[in-house]
Amino acid sequence: MRIVVKIGTSTLAHSGGRLNIRRVELLCKILSDLKNAGHALVLVTSGAIGMGVGKLGLPGRPQDMPGKQAAAAVGQCELMYFYDKLFSEYHHTVAQILLTAEDVRDPRRSAHLHDTLERLLSYGALPIVNENDAVATDEIGIETTIGENDTLSAIVAQLVGADLLILLSDIDGLYTADPHKNPDARLIPVVEAVTDKLRALAGGAGSALASGGMATKLKAAEIACGAGMDMVITNGQKPELLYDLFDGKAVGTRFLGRRPAL
């Protein structure tokens, strides 16, 4: 299978922004194992700003644009250092791709991006994609920024013709209510279509270092499922669930891709 995996900030880092070493080491080990099993992987990673906050010793996520961009510039180096180190231990080569909205919206640039990703996958490399937060800014127009990596991961999955998109989050999946506030909330195992009722269940952003939330994941599901692939939301704090997923067990919430009529 060709799989795109999106890793959120809450999966990568502790609340202070420093890398969660134990979890990331396990995650890279499992993803390497999936590659060894013959799957082609593309990784879409968040965490540059959060990692930069930790590396710079800042008290929290900057609120001004230059501060965010500076943290991203520092944090991206930290992210790729760890990814390269950890995947190299399992003999896998990583490649960094930093994108802005123009790279995916402009047909010529998008075609070049597609060709680069295809060549990297043919070489057996593991492309690691992130938005170029050091230069992308919504201050000079919303068209220049993608904004969050749930949407970016769905765009990348569509671009490479993935079979499956996996969003690793800080929650087990989509619930009937916010499980952090409502003990009666129930996990929704399968979603056939994103409806207005489902959108009403989506709250705001998750952790203090993250920018996405369930609403952005539903947006990603609409893009991915519209392109014919399934999407799964599962808990990134339990990387071993990926083994269950590929063993055919029910994991998290699966959004069913729309298949063409026969």
Image: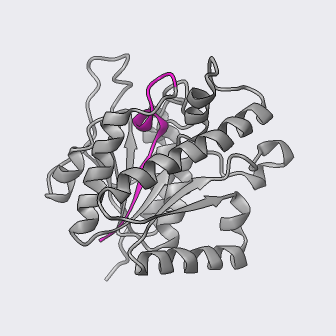
**Residue at (38% x, 16% y) in the render:** 181
| Location of residue 160 with respect to 66 vertically, above or below | below
Specify start and end residues of the magenta stretch as a single range: 1-16
Quadrant hosting residue 229: bottom left
**Residue at (77% x, 55% y) in the render:** 143
Q: Position of residue 135 (x, y in %)?
A: 76, 49
Q: Does residue 218 appear in this view?
A: no
Quadrant hosting residue 49: top right
Q: Nearer the viewer, residue 177 or 242?
A: 242
| Location of residue 86 with respect to 124 vertically, above or below | above
Any magenta on residue 131?
Answer: no
**Residue at (64% x, 26% y) in the render:** 61
Any magenta on residue 9?
Answer: yes
From the image, which quarter does the C terminus lie in?
A: bottom left
From the image, which quarter does the N terminus lie in?
A: bottom left
Q: Does residue 146 appear to the left or right of 82 in the view shown?
A: right
